Image: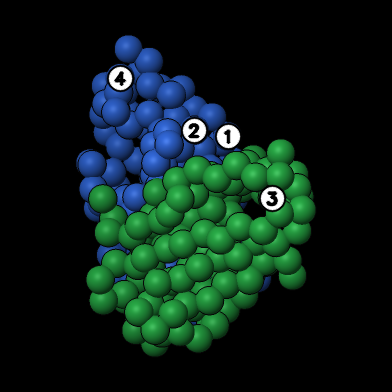
Chain colours: A green, B blue
């Protein structure tokens, strides 16, 4: 158990809908990262937050957005869902010391199925 | 831009045999390298990491990896594989900056036969 929790574990929805994925980082970790794992794209970095502020963006679509709240949990919002958004979405956290060397601890993931 | 190549998509190994998974990276500066393992239906677990220093790194579950700058490689090894090592293995490269994102390879699936 990494200490990172993600809810829900599974999500099934229809095209055009909007969903919210939630992540609670390890106690004390300031950085949260979101990754998407799909069969065709592999593991792709989406976005990073550090202590409530966006720190880095990867291959994140404009239909997707995220935020990190004062209690450091994070939410990934996916809207206007398409079939191709079906994937496993991972959250990871790290202590996030600026300039430090962090290892990332991954949650169990949320499996999103868009029908 | 950083990138990682794992040349082997799938490897089958007998229980008790040795295992080596290949990883090649492309990065302009000193890389920070990781190996993660993903068991079916699970998240990713860090096996080991290389930041600096000794180029032979020991990890959990009996794994080790060797950083070879001249070959841009960071291959993962285990002397004797157990059935529980069947999983998907990912090599990743990160960079030291304020955005510590990881770039992952495509992964190598390891099957262990009895």
Q: Nearer the viewer, mark 3 or mark 1?
A: 3
Marks 1 and 2, how far apart at CA: 6 Å
Binning the other alpha carbons within 10 Å of mark 2 as few (below 14), some (14 to 19) or many (20 upward) gives many
Rendered view: B64 above or below A48: above
Query: Residue A73 sits in which quadrant?
Result: bottom left
Q: Which residue is mark 4?
A: B15
Rendered view: B5 above or below A46: above
Q: Which residue is mark 2?
A: B109
Marks 3 and 2, how far apart at CA: 23 Å
The answer to whether residue A62 is visible is yes
Marks 3 and 1, how far apart at CA: 23 Å
Q: Could you tell whether A27 is left or right of A17 in the image?
A: left
Q: Which residue is mark 3?
A: A85
Q: Are the numbered discs 3 and 4 placed on the same chain, yes or no?
A: no
Q: Picture coordinates of residue B59 (x, y %)?
A: 26, 51
Rendered view: A69 above or below A24: below
Q: Picture coordinates of residue B113 (x, y %)?
A: 38, 15
| Label 4 secondary element | loop
N-terminal-most mark, 1 or 4: 1
Q: Are the numbered discs 4 and 2 placed on the same chain, yes or no?
A: yes
In terms of depth relative to the viewer, which is nearer, A101 or A108?
A108
Q: Which residue is mark 1?
A: B9
Marks 3 and 4, how far apart at CA: 37 Å
Q: Chain of mark 3?
A: A
């Amino acid at each position: 158990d990494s200490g990172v929790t993600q809810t829900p574990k599974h999500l099934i929805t229809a095209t055009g809908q909007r969903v919210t994925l939630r992540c609670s980082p390890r106690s004390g970790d300031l950085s949260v990262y979101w990754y998407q794992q799909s069969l065709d794209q592999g593991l792709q970095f989406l976005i990073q937050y550090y202590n409530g502020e966006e720190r880095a963006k990867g291959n994140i679509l404009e239909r997707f957005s995220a935020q990190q709240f004062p209690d450091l949990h994070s939410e990934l919002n996916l809207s206007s869902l398409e079939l191709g958004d079906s994937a496993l979405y991972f959250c990871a956290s790290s202590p996030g010391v600026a300039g430090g060397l962090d290892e990332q601890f991954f949650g169990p993931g949320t499996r999103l199925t868009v029908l | 831009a950083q990138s990682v190549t794992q040349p082997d998509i799938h490897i089958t190994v007998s229980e008790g045999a040795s295992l080596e998974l290949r990883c090649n990276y492309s990065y302009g500066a000193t890389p920070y390298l990781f190996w993660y393992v993903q068991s079916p239906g699970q998240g990713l677990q860090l096996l080991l990491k290389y930041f600096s220093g000794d180029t032979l790194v020991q990890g959990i579950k009996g794994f080790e990896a060797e950083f070879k700058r001249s070959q841009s490689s960071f291959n993962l090894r285990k002397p004797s594989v157990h059935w529980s090592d069947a999983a998907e293995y990912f090599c990743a490269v990160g960079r030291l900056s304020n955005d510590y994102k990881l770039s992952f390879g495509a992964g190598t699936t390891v099957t262990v036969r009895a």
